[in-house]
Amino acid sequence: MKDKGDRQKLGIFIDMITREDISDVELRKLWWTSPADIAFYDGAELRAFLKRVRDRL
């Protein structure tokens, strides 16, 4: 993503869905509703992945 504003919006979204009050099960269900090519079967692993993505934005 080249646009700084888009990266910032994505970071905010990731922060919203990885909050501690969102359970691993809820996060995994959200992921499975997307057309993602990568499968995560463990919500905790997905949360860690998303936080690493956010940190690299």
Image (tube, rainbow, N blue to C red):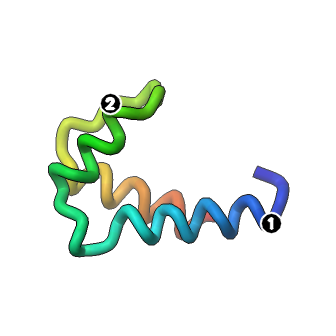
Q: Position of residue 41 (x, y in %)?
A: 20, 36
38 sits left or right of 42 in the view:
right
Tell me the element at label 2. loop
- Front in this rendered view, residue 25 or 38: 25
- Quick one: label 2, few (<14), some, or many (20+) residues within 10 Å? few
**Which residue is painted at 18% across and 56% down in the image?**
24
Identified by mark 2, the residue type is Ala
Tag of residue 30: none
The residue under the point 42% across, 64% down is: 51
Residue 13 vs 39, above or below: the answer is: below
Q: Position of residue 17 (x, y in %)?
A: 38, 62
Quadrant showing the C terminus: bottom right
Location of residue 23 by image quarter: bottom left
Few, some or many residues within 10 Å of mark 1 (<14, 14–19, 20+): few
With 35 as the anchor, is 22 left or right in this view? Answer: left
Q: In the rendered view, would you say 32 is above or below 6?
A: above
Which residue is identified by label 1? 4
Residue 45, horizontal then vertical, whole percent: 25, 51
Distance between the Cα atoms at labels 1 and 2? Answer: 27 Å
Kindly give the residue lying farthest to the right in the view shown.
3
Which residue position is annotated with label 2?
Answer: 39
Q: Residue furthest bottom?
A: 20
Please determine whether, in this image, residue 2 is positioned above or below residue 39: below
Q: Percent x, y for residue 28? A: 25, 44
Quadrant in the rendering for residue 29: top left
Residue in the image at 31% along x and 58% along y: 47
Q: Are marks 1 and 2 in contact (CB under 8 Å)?
A: no
Task: Tell which circle, 1 or 2, labels the residue nearer the N-terminal end.
Answer: 1
Residue in view at x 39 percent, y 54 percent: 49
On the rendered structure, is 43 left or right of 31? left
SS class, disc 1:
helix
